[in-house]
Structure formats: structure tokens, C-alpha cells
Amino acid sequence: MTIIIIVGICLFLMLFGWLVKFIQQKKKTSIPKVKKVKEKKVKHKKQETTVKNVHLTLQESFMIRKELLFWKYLNSILPRRFVVVPKVALNTLVVPDGDKTIFNLIADKSLDFVVFNEQNMRPILVIDIYDKSFNDENLEEQDPFLVEILGKLNLKVLHILVANDFDREETKKTIFKTLNITENPMNE
């Protein structure tokens, strides 16, 4: 009987040894060896974009005649240290500072004319033109909410009625007064 127990224990130990060896073999084969990968220089190909369906239409004219004439008038009266840009998108002048609620309300708006300081292109005056006609080329006055926001940004806003016979000299005086320009051309 003792021989049977000794043989059983020996068989058990051999089976146990074989099982441990089998498990170790499995672990070695199941863990993938990490190979060092050579870095390859990747050539970047130029991506070409193909435009198929544009779904856009080009505007017939950028400015209506009254806007164009007023823009030319502004360029003729203002000294060279000022730059007048028509139809300025508001989202190119302001950026949100934290909360984007108000920015989102005004981001798609545009301003009729913005007068910039030529040295640093800082906006210094917004000119809103309007007329009281009821035809296709009606120029509407700027939204009061937008004017209030521009005021809070310390950007002056002038509203100018541009009827066919608007007073050019009075308009010039108003603009010069707002920009603190003296009428002496020697100082400009």
C-alpha cells in the first residue's frame, strides 16, 4: 500500500511539474516581443480638394450705387492717416471674451463703413448710412442693439442719412468733429 501511495505521489509531482512547465511555455509564446521599429520618413502628399457642387451664387454687386458713392466721398475727405473699409463683418473686429452669448447674436452682422487708424488698423469710427427710400436699394439704419454693443466697446457710431441731396459739407464737419480732425490740411 505504501508503494502505491509513493507511486501516486510521484505521478502527481510529475504531472504537476509538467503542468507548470506547460504554463510557462504558454506565457512565453503569448507575450509578443516588442520589436524596435525604424522611423520612416513620411513624404506628405499635397492634398487636392475637388469642388463639385458649390451651391453658391456670386453677388451681382458688392455695394449699391449710394454706398459706392459715399465710400468714394469718405476717401476724398479723410486724411491719409485713415483707412475706410466698407461692409466690415463684425466677427472680424471683435472676439468673445469668455461667454459667447452676445458674440453669437452679433457675429453675422456687418457694418456699412469702418474708419481705421492706418498706423495700427485699429477701428475708430463706424459710419452707418441709411436712406428713407422704399425701393430695392433701401439702406436701413443699423440695429439699436448692435449700436449699444459698439458703444460699450468704445467705438463711436455715426448715422448718416444719404439722400440724393445730402449736405456734404455738414457731413464732413460731423465726421471731422467725431474724429477730432481740424480742417487745416497742413496739420494732416
Image (spheres, rainbow, N blue to C red):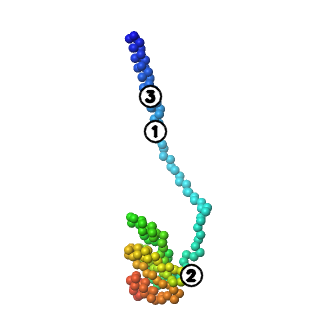
Q: Earlier in the sequence, mark 2 or mark 3?
A: 3
Q: Amino acid at mark 3?
A: Ile
Q: Earlier in the sequence, mark 1 or mark 2?
A: 1
Residue toward you, 177 or 162: 162
Q: Earlier in the sequence, mark 3 or mark 1?
A: 3
Element type at mark 3? helix
Reading the image, the residue beneath label 1 is 34
Q: CA distance from mark 3 to mark 1?
A: 21 Å
Q: Which mark is residue 135?
A: 2
Q: Amino acid at mark 1?
A: Val
Determine whether, in the image, residue 135 is placed left or right of residue 101.
Answer: right
Regarding residue 150, the answer to whether it shows in the image is no
Instruction: Give the position of the C terminus as an image quadrant.
Output: bottom left
Residue toward you, 186 or 162: 162
Determine whether, in the image, residue 32 is placed left or right of residue 45.
Answer: left
Q: Residue at x 51, y 89 (%)?
A: 165
Regarding residue 97, the answer to whether it shows in the image is yes
Q: Which mark is residue 23?
A: 3
Element type at mark 2? loop
Q: Amino acid at mark 2?
A: Asn
Q: Residue at x 48, y 42 (%)?
A: 37
The picture places residue 28, in percent across and down from the top left corner, at 45, 32
Q: Nearer the viewer, mark 3 or mark 1?
A: 3
Residue toward you, 91 or 143: 143
Residue lying farthest to the front in this orientation:
134
Q: CA distance from mark 2 to mark 3?
A: 90 Å
Is disc 2 in contact with disc 3, using a CB cutoff of under 8 Å?
Answer: no
The quadrant where residue 4 appears = top left
Query: Pointer 3: residues within 10 angstroms few (<14), some, or many (20+)?
Result: few
